[in-house]
Image: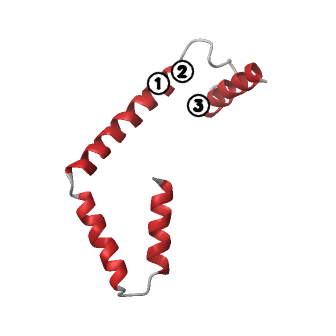
Amino acid sequence: MIAFVALLVGYVIGAKAGSKDLDEVVGALKRLGGTQEFADVVTATRSHVGHTLRELASVVDSPGAATEEASDLVDRVRHLFAGDAQSVG
């Protein structure tokens, strides 16, 4: 998705003002945004992101996930990843 946005931004920046090709891309994106399939993808993506964030929150807030000195979220995540790196290595 990020690559698509980057490609689109690059195309828009590189396109000549009033270009017919740019108008075609804009029209195609508007038509794509109005389809039921695109709406389904957006709904599924929102659901997946929500589920992933809830899972992350449960991991971060689980007992033993953070030490006493890890008082904020960034420290907790660093602590979690440091533990994973030690178990892998």
- Please state which of residues 68 and 64 is positioned toward the viewer in this rendering: 64
Identify the mark at residue 73; answer none if there is no mark. 3
| Label 1 crowd bin: few (<14), some (14–19), many (20+), radius 10 Å | few
Which picture quadrant has residue 15?
Answer: bottom left
Q: Is the C-beta separation of discs 1 and 2 under 8 Å?
A: yes
- x, y percentage for residue 79? 68, 25
Q: Amino acid at mark 3?
A: Leu
Identify the mark at residue 77; answer none if there is no mark. none
**Mark 3 or 1 closer to N-term?**
1
Question: Residue at (23%, 64%) from the top-left corner?
Answer: 31
Compared across the picture, whether 3 is left or right of 23 comes to right
- Please state which of residues 87 and 50 is positioned toward the viewer in this rendering: 87
Identify the mark at residue 59; answer none if there is no mark. 2
| Image quadrant in which the C terminus is located | top right
Q: Amino acid at mark 2?
A: Val
Mark 3 and mark 1: span between their CA atoms?
Answer: 14 Å
- x, y percentage for residue 50? 38, 33
Compared across the picture, whether 74 is left or right of 87 comes to left
Q: Nearer the viewer, mark 2 or mark 3?
A: 2
Secondary structure state at the residue bearing disc 3: helix
- x, y percentage for residue 73? 58, 31
Secondary structure state at the residue bearing disc 2: helix
Say which residue label 1 marks: 55
Question: Residue at (35%, 87%) from the top-left corner?
Answer: 18
